[in-house]
Image: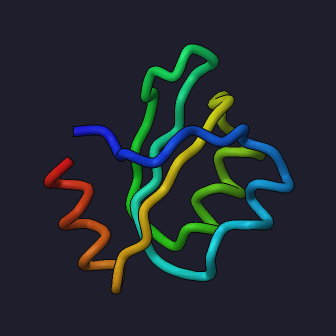
Amino acid sequence: MALRKGWEPLTRKTVGSAPEAYGIVEFGDGSGTVVEAAAGFLPDELREELAYGDAEQVRWQRAQSLEHAETLLDER
């Protein structure tokens, strides 16, 4: 199941607005199709995708810990 949060463009501004927290993140192409999902420290995941990936959009959900994020990722 995809995250309910709306897509945001994957830009430096969006990366800068990510909370300093663990969570799950979905990366999407220009049409809103999920191309990758990950669990981890949100700012790190977004920075890495911005630098090395090809996603155009992003959305995330905060988690209480890395373990919680991994569980949420497995359940999605």
Furthest-left residue in this view? 75
- Residue 34 in percent (x, y) is at 43, 28
Tally of marks? 0
Q: Is residue 9 left or right of residue 68?
A: right
Residue at 26% across, 66% down: 70
- Residue 48 in percent (x, y) is at 67, 53
Q: Is the residue 36 above or below the residue 39 in the image?
A: above
Residue at 81% across, 45% down: 11
Q: Is residue 57 left or right of residue 65?
A: right
Furthest-top residue in this view? 31
Q: Is the residue 10 above or below the residue 41 in the image?
A: above
Q: Is the residue 25 above or below the residue 67 in the image?
A: above
Q: Is residue 9 left or right of residue 22?
A: right
Residue at 65% across, 36% down: 53
- Residue 13 in percent (x, y) is at 85, 55
- Residue 12 in percent (x, y) is at 85, 53
Q: How is the image coloured?
A: rainbow
Q: Tell me which corner region of the image, top left, top right, bottom left or bottom right, holds residue 66.
A: bottom left
Residue at 64% across, 55% down: 46
* Image quarter hosting the N terminus: top left
Furthest-right residue in this view? 13
